[in-house]
Image (cartoon, rainbow, N blue to C red):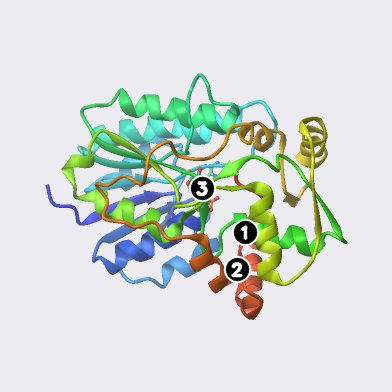
Amino acid sequence: MSIKHICVLGGSGFVGQQLIARLVKAGYMVRVLTRQRECHRDLLVLPTVEVIEADVYNPVALQMYLRGQDAVINLVGILNERRDNGQGFARAHVDLTRLVIDACRHCHILRLLHMSALHANARTGTSYYLRSKGEAEELLRAAPDLHITCFRPSVIFGPADRFFNNFALLLRLSPGVVPLACANTRFAPIYIGDVVSAFEQSLRNPHTYGQCYDLCGPQVYTLKQLLQYTARQLGIHRRIVALGKTPSWLLANLFQYMPLFRPITRDNFRSLQVDSICSQPFPAIFKIMPRSLEEIVPTYLGVANARQRNCHLQQRARREGSSLPP
Ligand SMILES: NC(=O)c1ccc[n+]([C@@H]2O[C@H](COP(=O)([O-])OP(=O)(O)OC[C@H]3O[C@@H](n4cnc5c(N)ncnc54)[C@H](OP(=O)(O)O)[C@@H]3O)[C@@H](O)[C@H]2O)c1
């Protein structure tokens, strides 16, 4: 079936904004459901985008707003929850996925794209984040009547990302020495432009139905190397001290209840016990040559781009208190 109207949940965030811009450019009509419409005026100015304030956990409201759509993209995800008991993750990742599947069936929408995370697994996931993402994947696998494609990226970088921009903030706030938790955990950061290309390409490709794709960038780095790289980009010198496991856990506990800036939480610490790297190359079905961070990061994090960076950080700070993605 042809796809023209797409409803996006979680479309106001870092990934959503880039994806929606791409979908608009490709000629799709996009409906974004958000909890706070007034916070996302930047989406309102895009042509062919309607932003609707909705309680996505209300099945009746969800069905009402999905009616008439040809496809749904669910990007909703949280990195932290208020209490460290898994309930916030379960609601945003598992309960909502169940509601989306039910609403798709109710509205006879077959096409569903879902954002998960690398190493999500309901049983072996090391954190509430990874286990709840894994439980959501199990719900998707149990819905073979729908045409579902799922994506599992490593950490995503690009302008307004939470990763390098928070690193930059951390480095600037630190006096001379930066204690770094889980410094040896490895990542294969993937460029946001490549992630949204994979979403866009899969939308109308039936060969991607029922598939789940791990998405990684071309190079692997430790967390310490990434922090050192960020410092070089900013042109500042800091001594980065890699903490062992116990001090890392203590630091995560210290930051757990900080109100605004949380470089690491307990659940982030648990996620960081596993390397965020792929065992396979980038999926060949997508005609994408993943970009390196050396190619992209200097365009938004370099010394010359300080003004743009501050603008992105201010926008993000207005939206939420933030922490590094696991
Ligand atoms: N960024 C990364 O490095 C990365 C890596 C791997 C996987 N992912 C996954 O990719 C997805 C998008 O990530 P992102 O970086 O764009 O995140 P983001 O900037 O925090 O945006 C998340 C979106 O989800 C919605 N949302 C947040 N909490 C919610 C809740 N409790 N209930 C309902 N909606 C909620 C928000 O929409 P409103 O505020 O408008 O309602 C927001 O637009 C997530 O599922 C994330 O787990 C991200």
Pick the front one: 60 or 99: 99
> Quick check: 314 left or right of 219?
right
Instruction: Left or right? Give the position of 281 relative to 158.
Output: left
Task: Judge depth for marks 1 and 2 and give the one in front.
Answer: 1
Answer above or below: position of 230 versus 87.
below
The Cα–Cα distance between marks 3 and 1, rounded to whole angstroms, is 13 Å
Question: On the image, numbered disc 1 is attached to which residue?
Answer: 164
Q: Give the residue type that dot 1 points to.
A: Phe
Q: Residue 219 or 111: which is nearer the viewer?
A: 219
Q: Is residue 200 above or below residue 283?
A: below
Residue at 18% x, 52% y is: 3
Quadrant of the rendered structure where residue 214 is?
Answer: top left
Q: Amino acid at mark 3?
A: Ala
Residue 151 rendering spot, x and y as whole percentages: 38, 42
Asked whether the residues under the numbered discs 3 and 1 touch, taking CB atoms below 8 Å apart as contact, a structural biologist would say no
Query: What residue did someone put label 3 on?
Result: 188
Which circle marks residue 312 in the picture?
2
Q: Residue at x 37, y 51 (%)?
A: 8
For the residue marked with disc 2, what is the amino acid? Answer: His
Question: Which numbered disc, 2 or 3, marks the residue that appears first in the sequence?
Answer: 3
Circle 3 SS class: loop
